[in-house]
Image (spheres, grey):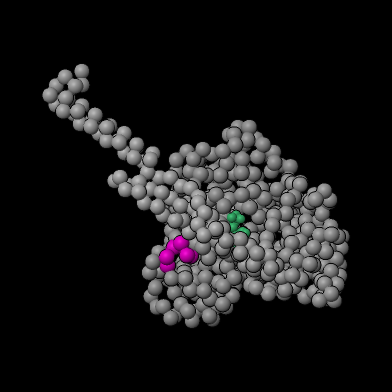
């Protein structure tokens, strides 16, 4: 037996002593802490009574309201017309949706090519569901890479004309992974002032010096680069700006990056499937294929699925797989999502009319708005209708909702304070008649809200 040898007996008595000590500690703890309430000067006070080494101590707890600051902030948001709530849609995301039991024309969705509810995309997803089940069961580097993940990455790389692609769980996670992987303390990231929140957060996480340059202002960018000679780093910009719908000056950005030895990165979230003759994005639009170092994007907009990605060289892909924390430490997307995204990308290649129809709709809608006195000239599926005051933007949006047009108000912090707007987003499947009636309703509503003050 264990206690038969002298060494064993010593060990046994040691273990028993330890257990006795544990029991004593437990007993002391059972009696040590007690909390309660008592009245003092007519006010109910909470107290904690403690017994330590036979001595009793009593500590009054300050009556603090832990939620006070949070509740006050919520009140302030309500007062400033900046409080946000979800709008619950009761159908699939498509050009017509059901909302609060009514049919609405959807004019705000990022599903620009209307793939969320496309028959063949859903078929591919259903097949993946039957074969691979619902979840991926692990992160990409453990058990979460199926053949569908690698097939999607190959399809993406081909679509973007790059050697390789790396898929992340969201676009937000992609920017939060790529930027801190490529840049560190001592480096500089030059970032457009209107870049998406995920880029801003990615810059913060990297600990590099973040230098914000004026929107699409290449002279300001160059001035700021020159002020930091010889510093290693990266220039990053939205390809299509997510709220204003304008495009990056890609020729200017790439020229500066190359001239000063900086990496160039664009976020193609709203460019993929939208701009360029065949929807391949900003490089195709500017006839600059292969010139940007890192093409980041998301599968959650025109592709109609979920997930973010980076496209570039093999060395970029290898590096991200080893260094990007949001790639390494997060469960990978389900095979169902991978199959849907891959089929949607193939459909863009097989049926170029979709991108053509979307671009035609953009021209038509902008023309219809201009005819009604609303100045706009977007080349992308995002068409901002500037309102100004948050309260007024909410009012216009509410009036349009009443009339069956789903188009929410965009307010701070998504845009600057006092620069609230309606952000119309078009789909390839909107008809010209729908867009004309939407343009008429928007013009009438904006005018009516203006008259009301
Ligand atoms: C420019 C831009 N980048 C990144 C993202 C984040 O992508 P995701 O929604 O896939 O997380 C968005 C989403 O709104 C975006 O507009």
Vertical position of residue 375 compared to residue 21: above or below: below
Residue at the spot x=74%, y=42% of the render? 119
What's the magenta region? Answer: 203-208
Residue at the spot x=44%, y=40% of the render? 142
Between 418 and 23, the one lying in front of the other is 23
Residue 122 pos. (x, y %): 70, 41
Residue 310 pos. (x, y %): 52, 56
Residue at the spot x=68%, y=73% of the render? 419
Residue 443 visible to the viewer? no
Q: Main secondary structure of the magenta part?
A: helix
Q: How many marks?
A: 0
Q: Is residue 183 left or right of residue 377?
A: left
Q: Is residue 248 left or right of residue 233?
A: right
Residue 184 pos. (x, y %): 40, 64
- Give the image quadrant in which the ligand numbered 1 is located: bottom right
Q: Tell me which corner region of the image, top left, top right, bottom left or bottom right, holds residue 383.
A: bottom right
Between 199 and 149, the one lying in front of the other is 199
Residue 335 pos. (x, y %): 58, 40
Between 13 and 254, the one lying in front of the other is 13
């Amino acid at each position: 037996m264990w206690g038969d040898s002298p060494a064993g007996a010593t060990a046994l008595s040691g273990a028993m002593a330890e257990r006795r000590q544990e029991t004593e500690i437990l007993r002391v703890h059972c009696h040590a802490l007690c909390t309660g309430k008592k009245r003092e000067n007519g006010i109910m006070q909470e107290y904690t009574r403690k017994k330590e080494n036979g001595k009793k101590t009593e500590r009054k707890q300050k009556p603090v309201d832990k939620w006070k600051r949070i509740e006050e902030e919520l009140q302030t948001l309500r007062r400033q017309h900046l409080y946000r709530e979800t709008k619950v849609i009761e159908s699939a995301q498509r050009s017509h949706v059901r909302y609060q039991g009514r049919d609405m024309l959807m004019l705000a969705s990022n599903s620009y090519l209307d793939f969320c509810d496309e028959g063949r995309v859903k078929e591919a997803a259903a097949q993946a569901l039957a074969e691979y089940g619902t979840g991926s069961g692990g992160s990409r580097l453990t058990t979460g890479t199926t053949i569908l993940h690698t097939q999607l990455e190959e399809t993406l790389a081909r679509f973007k004309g790059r050697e390789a692609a790396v898929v992340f769980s969201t676009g937000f996670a992609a920017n939060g992974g790529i930027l801190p992987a490529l840049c560190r303390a001592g480096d500089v990231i030059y970032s457009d002032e209107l870049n998406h929140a995920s880029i801003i957060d990615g810059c913060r996480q990297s600990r590099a010096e973040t230098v914000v340059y004026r929107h699409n202002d290449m002279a300001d960018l160059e001035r700021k680069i020159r002020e930091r000679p010889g510093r290693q780093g990266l220039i990053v910009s939205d390809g299509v700006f997510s709220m204003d719908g304008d495009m990056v000056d890609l020729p200017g950005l790439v020229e500066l990056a190359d001239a000063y030895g900086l990496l160039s990165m664009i976020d193609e979230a709203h460019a993929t499937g939208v701009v360029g003759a065949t929807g391949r994005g900003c490089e195709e639009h500017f006839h600059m294929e292969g010139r940007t170092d890192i093409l980041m994007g998301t599968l959650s907009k025109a592709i109609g699925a979920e997930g973010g990605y980076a496209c570039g060289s093999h060395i970029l892909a290898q590096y991200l797989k080893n260094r990007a924390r949001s790639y390494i430490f997060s469960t990978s997307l389900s095979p169902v999502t991978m199959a849907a995204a891959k089929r949607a990308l193939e459909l863009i290649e097989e049926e170029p009319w979709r991108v053509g129809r979307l671009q035609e709709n953009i021209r038509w809608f902008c023309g219809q708005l201009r005819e009604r006195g609303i100045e706009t000239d977007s080349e992308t599926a995002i068409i901002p209708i500037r309102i100004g005051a948050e309260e007024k933007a909410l009012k216009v949006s509410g009036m349009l909702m009443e009339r069956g047009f789903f188009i929410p108000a965009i307010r701070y912090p998504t845009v600057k304070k006092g620069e609230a707007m309606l952000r119309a987003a078009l789909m390839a499947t909107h008809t010209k008649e729908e867009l004309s009636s939407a343009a008429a309703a928007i013009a009438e509503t904006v005018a009516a809200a203006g008259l009301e003050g």
